[in-house]
Image (cartoon, grey):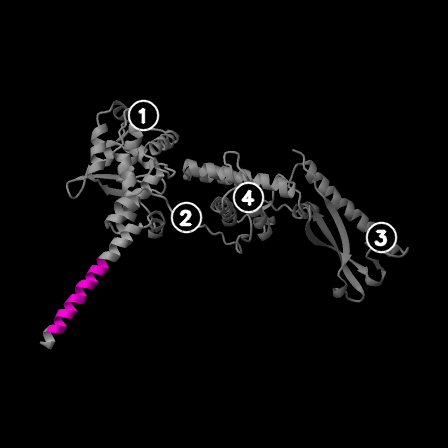
Amino acid sequence: MRTSSTFSVLFWIYTKRAKNNLAVIYARITVNGRKLTISLKRKADVSLWNSSKQRVAGNCPQSKDLNQFLDQEHSRLFQCYQELKIEGKVLSPESIKTKYFGEEVRLFSLEDIFKYHSDHMFSKLKYNTSRMYNTSQNYIRQFLKKEYKRNDFYLRELDYSFILRFENFLRAVRPRHYQKSLQHNAVMKHIQRLRKMVTLAFHLEWIDRDPFVKFKPHLIQKERGFLSAEELESIENLEIEGQRLKRVRDLFIFSCYTGISYGDLMLLTPQNLMIGIDRKFWIITKREKNGNQVKLPLLTKAISLIENYKNEESCIINNSLLPRISNQKVNSYLKEIAGMCKIQKKITFHLARHTFATTVALTNGVPIETVSKILGHRKLSTTQIYAKVVERKVSDDMEMLQQKLNIQGKLSSVQSKGKID
């Protein structure tokens, strides 16, 4: 794709700093609206300088020599611009300055940090995370072409304005697979990924300042959906004939009573099922997302589901604790199950994890610290986002408090009467 660019050079003098009526001549390089000023190490007589012509007046040898020098430097700067353009290099005032002075300093660009991040960091990331980094990088490329008419951007050119313009660009994006524009949190996530890559460049000493210092991204905390006890019961008791929906229903119910995510559930093997310190069945595993160890004593309903599938051929072949089904099929079949149960909520497999935290655990008095350990969270604050205490639990707790206050009131009344008598 061919891109157009604008280039100009303006010669000027700094009259306020003139000494003996001589002022230093500067060249202001402008590329696509970005400006940079360099000193030409020559001086001009303030009284002879013609600002409109950007030259000195007069026909004396000194004036002719200086004007010839300015013509020559203008040609040199334009030649630097042309060579960079032909070479397909990043066009910017900084790159022209570097070429003009013959500096050998390596200027790193966004594409450089993209490649470095992909080559050195992707091996440490989960597949979905690396996939989202690729998506963010593609959005940045689209942004550069639209806003700057460029294919790349030097890291040292990044500034606060760049970040704000990228944010505005993202808010107008309409992904092909999505009907609406990107939501606020999605926009912030793309900017956070850009920030992590730029921070990596800063630590590599590719740039000497952090352009994100003034930018404060913030995510909007959303209420996490979950099934009520009645909705969970309706799915459990649903009469299903075919194995297709029955298996998905069982996997979903298992997660509702364990809090295990889809990704971790698909990795469970019979070796993860152990006898715990209470001589009962536990699942001991590590979360795929963060590597945190999870030690989970199993409830009766979860144990019965494991029993149902321990002799199934596919589980034996795959050495899996439960049947393995693709995430896409699981979520598709869950929509069918929700329709059969007349549940209006949008049900995905991850809803089971939320349901465990709220309806199964917190509502029944399990301390949030315990729920956090079971879910494999690193921070308690993460659990507080996933596990909102339902209103019925709040109502029950307040009712219990009221009963205690009533009892205390009666005791006080009896004691007062006893003293009077």
Q: Is residue 249 visible?
A: yes
Q: Secondary structure at mark 3?
A: helix
Q: Secondary structure at mark 1?
A: helix
Which numbered marker is on residue 292? none
Do the CB atoms of the residues marked 4 and 2 lie less than 8 Å apart?
no
Q: Which residue is mark 4?
A: 170
Please tell me whether the stretch drawn in magenta is mainly helix, strand or loop: helix
Q: Which amino acid type is marked by label 1? A: Arg
Q: Which residue is mark 2?
A: 222
Which numbered marker is on residue 65? 3
- Choose the circle earlier in sequence order: 3 or 2: 3
Residue 305, image x, y percentages:
23, 32
Q: Mark 2 Cα within 10 Å, few/some/many (few <14, many 20+)?
A: few
- Give the distance between the C-alpha atoms of the residues marked 4 and 3, in whole angstroms: 52 Å
Residue 143, image x, y percentages:
59, 41
Q: Residue at x 25, y 22 (%)?
A: 313
Q: Nearer the viewer, mark 4 or mark 2?
A: 2
Residue 293, image x, y percentages:
29, 43
- Give the distance between the C-alpha atoms of the residues marked 2 and 1, in whole angstroms: 33 Å
Task: Give the total number of marks visible in the rendering.
Answer: 4
Which numbered marker is on residue 244? 1
Between residues 315 and 200, which one lies in front from this camera angle? 315
* Residue 413 highlighted magenta (yes or no): yes
Q: Residue at x 35, y 33 (%)?
A: 339
**Highlighted magenta segment, given as a residue range:** 400-417
- Give the distance between the C-alpha atoms of the residues marked 4 and 2, in whole angstroms: 20 Å
Residue 210, image x, y percentages:
53, 53
Relative horizontal placement of residue 123, taking residue 167 as reference (left or right): left
Q: Which amino acid type is marked by label 4? A: Leu
